[in-house]
Amino acid sequence: MSRPEFENHDWVTFLEATTSRGPLEYFHSAMEFVDGNRGKGRQAIDLGCGGGADTRGLLARGWRVLAVDAEPEARRMLELRTPDAHRERLEIMIGQFHAVLLPPADLVYAQFSLPFAGDDHHAAVVNALSAVSPGGAFVGQLFGEHDDWASDPHVAWVDRNWIEQTFSDFAEVDIDERDNEGPYGTEGSIKRWHFFHIRARR
Ligand SMILES: C[S@@+](CC[C@H](N)C(=O)[O-])C[C@H]1O[C@@H](n2cnc3c(N)ncnc32)[C@H](O)[C@@H]1O
């Protein structure tokens, strides 16, 4: 079934613009949180894998990776750019965050992806967290109300209270709130960013 929230954004353009970049600071922060350079034998889920930079970063560190995205083009980009030697540790799933059946994982990584589930945001986050194994981690970003995109009815935002309640069964929750003007896209545009960089351990 088609999803208006998903179709409201031009994700193919985003994927094309970002597919050749390397991991961002949030990814390195996640790796620090889970000792991620020792991925061998561990399962990660890259939720909203987009152009595939973080999936490739995980594979390069030895993780098995389930890359999930609703945009079918994500599969083609990953297949194009994943080195043959890493292919057997990669599974690709095309589907919606709230509806996909996720396996247990040592790391669920959702970089700037879950807010775009729109009306399905709550179910999407619950589904993501349910995949985190005991001792495993979730790392991802959720938007706050001051973000320029929070006024878009297809983008979900939360507050610190919501996060604390939703992650209440996690043993450790580290919330790094950012609220600042900053660049986005490839053409030097500036927007107000307000988001929570969340690192949680079950
Ligand atoms: C802002 S991009 C982030 C991509 C990647 N994590 C990154 O940081 O470059 C959001 C991604 O989520 C995907 N997406 C948006 N809504 C989705 C949904 N409801 N279910 C699954 N994927 C979705 C988009 O196709 C896109 O690849």
Image (spheres, helix red, strand yellow):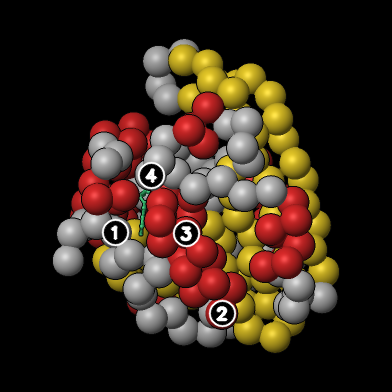
Gap between marks 4 and 2, in whole Å?
23 Å
Q: Which residue is drawn at 41% across and 61% down?
A: 120
Disc 1 CB within 8 Å of nearest ligand 1 atom: yes
**Mark 4: amino acid:** His
Q: Quadrant of residue 11?
A: top left
Q: Position of residue 25 (x, y in %)?
A: 65, 41
Foreground of the two, 99 or 182:
99
Gap between marks 3 and 2, in whole Å?
14 Å
**Mark 3: amino acid:** His
Left or right of 173 in this view: 157: left
Q: Quadrant of the N terminus?
A: bottom left
Q: Which residue is drawn at 75% across and 78% down?
A: 169
**Mark 2: amino acid:** Ser
Q: Which marked residue is nearer to the observer: mark 3 or mark 2?
A: 3
Gap between marks 3 and 4, in whole Å?
10 Å
- The label number, if any, that marks residue 121 in the structure image: 3
Q: In which quarter of the image is residue 152?
A: top left
Q: Which marked residue is nearer to the observer: mark 1 or mark 4?
A: 4
Q: Position of residue 67 (x, y in %)?
A: 39, 65
Q: Vertically, is 131 above or below 8?
A: below
Gap between marks 2 and 1, in whole Å?
19 Å
Q: Which residue is drawn at 56% across and 61% down?
A: 109
**Mark 1: amino acid:** Ala
Instruction: Report helix, strand or loop for mark 1.
Output: loop
Residue assigned mark 4: 154
Residue assigned mark 2: 130
Of labels 1 and 4, earlier in sequence is 1
Gap between marks 1 and 4, in whole Å?
15 Å
Disc 3 to disc 1: CB gap under 8 Å: no
